[in-house]
């Protein structure tokens, strides 16, 4: 049975420094307040065994934050010591690196290694050579769904048994590998169906095969009968051959005699043909000879032998002369070839000499030109010796090295200037942006103030209209008083007295309204600065409300995940206050537990590191 012994975490979540935990048998309890790192241990175990990151994490949140560390790159590592199902000690290591880019965090996995202690030595397997996830599952003897959903189940997924039916079925199918067995059953059913079809086909073929077998048996029986008849006929043939043996022997003898006769006839024809040729040759030679040899046959034979000897001597001399001629021809050919080669080489040497002369002239002109350009002394007029040329090359080389050095120094100086200018440009751009933003705000405030001034002007116009109305009313009042006097004079005092009181009441109301409007006009003139500040405050309030709305829109998904819905700002404020109050309480308890754990850890940390090493 496999067994987990030790776990080392470094650069993961809040574990910036290496931390080691030793697991006891048969049970290890990990207790602590919220934020103590219990879930991180479970996440690290799940990551080292299955290679999966925690839920709702893209990897960057799993590694220690580079911003908190004050670095652009932070490396994390999880190391696990265990015993596999065979009882062999295994150490698995997974490493990550989190890099702070300009706009985002980027996390990538480094090389993973598994070390096994087999046959009194450690053997390593890298992720470049094997699938580390499969190797870990093989070492633990437990499937990946069991590790994810049962043994190292994350607290955010711990309520999966209460999920919907479809999700729950999928989880159980993964845990019990039901999908594999279902596929196996489907494969068996498919195979059974195929085999049933094959059986039907074989039964059909079997009927034909039976008919063919019966016919084959019949044919075999006929063949046996035919073979018996053939053997009987062969026996008769053998008997006939035995009786014909003496006849064949006699025929062979007669054939040999016939062959001998044919050979003799052929030789006779050849001899007759040779005789005829010799006779014709003799007659031809006799016709050509004018002087016949006057001597005996012996003298003729002697003369023939001497003549043959002379002919051989002449032939020998002729062969020697021909050999001499061949030798001379061969020597002539070789000399001709050498002559052609020499002529070709002579032409090449002439061309090379001319080219060399041209190169020397070009070199001399180049030396003079470069000497004038770089003010080298002693190279005014050609020709230049080899030592002079070497001196020019050394001088040129020193000048080139000096120019390279000066170029590097100038490049560095210009680069520093460019960096300085670029820094100033960035500062100017930043200042320009601030000025533009200030101008935009001032422009908006100016437009708002102009609108307010137009409104105040309109109100003042209304006040002037009210004043004119008051003047008309006073005129009407004077006319009414005059009419009243006339009426009094005429005797209708009671009726017009009532009208007068009504007009006086309207006059008092109009005077009161006029006084109020004048006070408002004066207050507007006196509080124009306050009004401008108020408008600016309103503008800032609207901008802040827009910013708050943008922040709420950007974090709408997170708010919904935390509070169930985004809702209005005041509701969220109350929810956040409650949430913060609750988390502060949890944080206080977690800090107490962290202090306890730190006290326990400080006493065991040195021993655990020494044991792990």
Image (cartoon, rainbow, N blue to C red):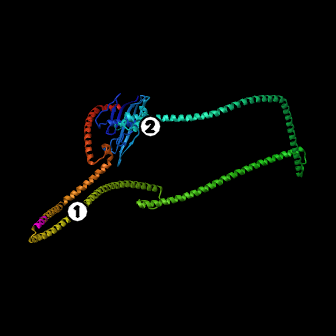
Looking at the image, residue 245 lies above or below residue 374: above
Q: Position of residue 533 (x, y in %)?
A: 21, 57
489 left or right of 407?
Answer: left
- Residue closest to the eye, 568 or 128: 568
Q: Position of residue 261 (x, y in %)?
A: 87, 37
Looking at the image, residue 494 lies above or below residue 201: below
Q: Secondary structure at mark 2?
A: loop
Q: Was residue 300 drawn as part of the magenta stretch in this picture? A: no
Residue marked by disc 1: 455
321 left or right of 123?
Answer: right
Q: Is label 2 in contact with label 1 (beta carbons under 8 Å)? A: no
> What's the mark number on residue 131?
2
Q: Position of residue 202 (x, y in %)?
A: 60, 34
The answer to whether residue 21 is visible is yes
- Residue closest to the eye, 230 or 94: 230
Q: Position of residue 22 (x, y in %)?
A: 34, 31
125 left or right of 342?
Answer: left
Q: Secondary structure at mark 1?
A: helix
Q: Write the start and end of the magenta stretch as one range.
A: 494-502
Q: Look at the image and tell me in which quarter the N terminus lies.
A: top left
Q: Earlier in the sequence, mark 2 or mark 1?
A: 2
287 left or right of 591?
Answer: right
């Amino acid at each position: 049975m496999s067994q987990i012994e030790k776990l080392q975490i470094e650069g993961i979540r809040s574990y910036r420094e290496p931390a080691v935990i030793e697991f006891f048998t048969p049970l290890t309890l990990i207790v602590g307040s919220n934020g103590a790192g219990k879930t991180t241990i479970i996440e690290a175990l799940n990551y080292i065994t299955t290679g999966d990151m925690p839920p709702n994490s893209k990897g960057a949140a799993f590694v220690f934050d580079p911003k908190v560390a004050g670095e652009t790159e932070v490396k994390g590592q999880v190391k696990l010591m265990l015993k596999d199902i065979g009882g062999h000690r295994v150490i698995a290591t997974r490493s990550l690196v989190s890099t702070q880019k300009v706009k985002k965090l980027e996390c990538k996995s480094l090389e993973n290694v598994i070390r096994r202690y087999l046959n009194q030595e450690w053997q390593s397997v890298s992720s470049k050579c094997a699938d580390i996830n499969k190797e870990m599952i093989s070492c633990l003897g437990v499937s990946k769904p069991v590790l994810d959903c049962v043994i190292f189940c994350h607290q955010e997924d711990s309520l999966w048994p209460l999920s919907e039916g479809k999700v729950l079925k999928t989880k159980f199918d993964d845990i019990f590998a039901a999908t594999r067995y279902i596929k196996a059953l489907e494969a068996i059913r498919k195979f059974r169906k195929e085999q049933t079809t094959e059986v039907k086909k074989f039964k059909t073929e079997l009927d034909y095969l039976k008919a063919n077998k019966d016919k084959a048996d019949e044919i075999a029986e006929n063949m046996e009968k035919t073979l018996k008849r053939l053997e009987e006929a062969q026996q008769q043939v053998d008997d006939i051959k035995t009786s014909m043996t003496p006849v064949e022997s006699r025929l062979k003898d007669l054939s040999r005699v016939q062959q001998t006769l044919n050979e003799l006839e052929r030789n006779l024809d050849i001899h007759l043909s040779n005789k005829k040729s010799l006779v014709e040759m003799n007659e031809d030679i006799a016709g050509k000879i004018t002087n016949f040899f006057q001597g005996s046959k012996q003298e003729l034979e002697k003369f023939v032998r001497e003549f043959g000897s002379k002919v051989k001597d002449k032939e020998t001399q002729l062969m020697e002369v021909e050999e001499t001629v061949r030798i001379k021809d061969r020597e002539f050919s070789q000399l001709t070839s050498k002559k052609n080669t020499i002529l070709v080489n002579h032409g090449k040497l002439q061309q090379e000499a001319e080219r060399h002369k041209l190169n020397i002239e070009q070199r001399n002109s180049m030396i003079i030109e470069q000497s004038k350009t770089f003010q080298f002394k002693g190279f005014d007029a050609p020709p230049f010796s080899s030592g002079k040329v070497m001196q020019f090359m050394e001088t040129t080389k020193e000048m080139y090295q000096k120019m390279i050095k000066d170029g590097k120094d100038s490049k560095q100086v210009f680069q520093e200037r460019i960096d300085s200018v670029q820094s100033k440009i960035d500062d100017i751009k930043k200042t320009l942006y601030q000025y533009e933003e200030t101008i935009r705000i001032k422009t908006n405030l100016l437009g708002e103030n102009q609108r307010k001034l137009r409104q105040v002007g309109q109100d003042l116009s209304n006040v002037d209209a009210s004043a004119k109305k008051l003047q008309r009313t006073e005129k009407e009042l004077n006319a009414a008083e005059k009419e009243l006097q006339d009426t009094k004079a005429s005797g209708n005092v009671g009726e017009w007295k009532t009208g007068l009181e009504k007009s006086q009441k309207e006059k008092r109301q109009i005077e009161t309204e006029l006084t109020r409007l004048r006070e408002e006009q004066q207050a507007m003139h006196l509080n124009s600065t306050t009004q401008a500040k108020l408008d600016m405050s309103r503008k800032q309030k609207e901008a802040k409300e827009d910013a708050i709305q943008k922040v709420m829109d950007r974090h709408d998904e997170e708010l919904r995940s935390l509070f169930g819905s985004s809702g209005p700002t005041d509701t969220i404020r109350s929810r956040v206050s409650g949430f913060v109050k609750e988390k502060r309480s949890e944080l206080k308890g977690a800090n107490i537990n962290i202090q306890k754990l730190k006290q326990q850890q400080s006493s065991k940390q040195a021993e655990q590191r020494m044991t792990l090493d």
